[in-house]
Image (cartoon, rainbow, N blue to C red):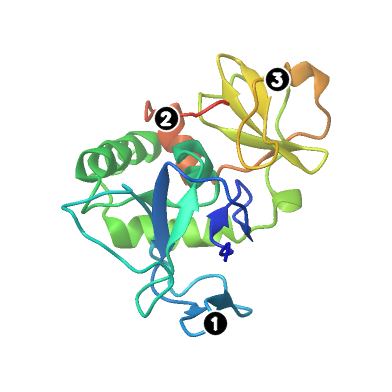
């Protein structure tokens, strides 16, 4: 049974056989452990995180009685969907991300999980069509996800790479060729990218 637990850059949950490079959750369980299906909810709390696939040899039954496990193609996808690095299994990345957010917003100290989750929850729930429009002349940092014509693209090496199926495809296009470009990556995530945080991008 293919579970509806793969996350697109828009944050939607889809059923596809492709495997992810990272996994995470949305603050608890929102699936039915008996049928292993989803209802109408798409999160349990504001604590949306992105984790390593393996950590300290822990074994889990996916979509059992614990939290709802989700999988991502890469971290650029996870950030676009509103999932920050986990402070437990990805401590180094989480600290680097927090430091970047601190620099981006001129905060007095590195923000903790509660600050990040409260801010990100407001941002990621804004529909893509209502998010900021992007000038094609703007230089966007690597890992930024944008949308044009209802389709997501990730920025890398100064060009946009399209999301096809369940991954970024090796079919780059210049921003000047896209129309009505919208920012998908939440503003706080974009701030971290602008301040130097660099998520891995997997182009296939």
Residue at image location 21% in from the left, 39% down from the top: 92
- N-term-proximal mark, 1 vs 3: 1
- N-term-proximal mark, 3 vs 2: 3
Question: Is 11 positioned to the left or the right of 90 in the image?
Answer: right
Residue 59 image offset from top left, x and y in percent: 25, 62
Residue farthest toward the left in the current orientation of the protein: 56
In the depicted structure, whether residue 134 falls above or below residue 13: above
- Asked whether the residues under the numbered discs 2 and 1 touch, taking CB atoms below 8 Å apart as contact, a structural biologist would say no
Residue at image location 36% in from the left, 80% down from the top: 65
Residue 187 image offset from top left, x and y in percent: 53, 44
Question: Is 107 positioned to the left or the right of 68 in the image?
Answer: left
Quick one: quadrant of the N terminus? bottom right
In the depicted structure, whether residue 123 falls above or below residue 169: below
Q: Nearer the viewer, residue 204 or 138?
A: 204
- Residue wearing tag 1: 35
Q: Secondary structure at mark 2?
A: loop
Residue 197 image offset from top left, x and y in percent: 37, 30
Q: Secondary structure at mark 3?
A: loop
Could you say which disc has been placed on residue 150 in the image?
Answer: none
Q: Secondary structure at mark 1?
A: loop
Q: CA distance from mark 3 to mark 2?
A: 18 Å
- Residue wearing tag 3: 171
Q: CA distance from mark 1 to mark 3?
A: 39 Å
Q: Residues within 10 Å of mark 3 (few under 14, many from 20)?
A: few
- Asked whether the residues under the numbered discs 1 and 3 touch, taking CB atoms below 8 Å apart as contact, a structural biologist would say no
- Residue wearing tag 2: 200
- N-term-proximal mark, 2 vs 1: 1
Residue at image location 65% in from the left, 27% down from the top: 169
Residue at image location 46% in from the left, 42% down from the top: 189
Question: Is 143 positioned to the left or the right of 14 in the image?
Answer: left
């Amino acid at each position: 049974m293919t579970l509806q637990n793969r996350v697109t850059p828009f944050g939607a949950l889809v059923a596809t056989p492709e495997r992810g490079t990272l996994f995470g959750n949305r603050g608890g369980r929102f699936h039915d452990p008996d049928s292993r299906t989803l209802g109408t909810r798409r999160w349990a709390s504001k604590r949306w995180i992105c984790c390593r696939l393996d950590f300290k040899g822990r074994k889990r039954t996916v979509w059992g009685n614990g939290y709802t496990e989700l999988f991502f193609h890469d971290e650029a996808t996870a950030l676009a969907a509103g999932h920050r690095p986990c402070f437990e299994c990805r401590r180094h990345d989480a600290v680097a991300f927090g430091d970047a957010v601190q620099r981006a917003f001129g905060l007095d100290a590195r923000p903790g999980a509660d600050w990040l989750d409260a801010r990100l929850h407001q941002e990621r729930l804004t529909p893509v069509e209502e998010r900021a429009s992007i000038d094609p002349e703007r230089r966007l940092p690597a890992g930024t996800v944008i949308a044009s014509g209802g389709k997501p693209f990730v920025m890398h090496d100064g060009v946009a790479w399209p999301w096809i199926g369940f991954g970024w495809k090796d079919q780059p296009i210049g921003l000047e060729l896209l129309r009505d470009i919208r920012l998908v990556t939440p503003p706080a995530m974009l701030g971290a990218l602008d301040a130097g945080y660099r998520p891995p991008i997997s182009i296939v």
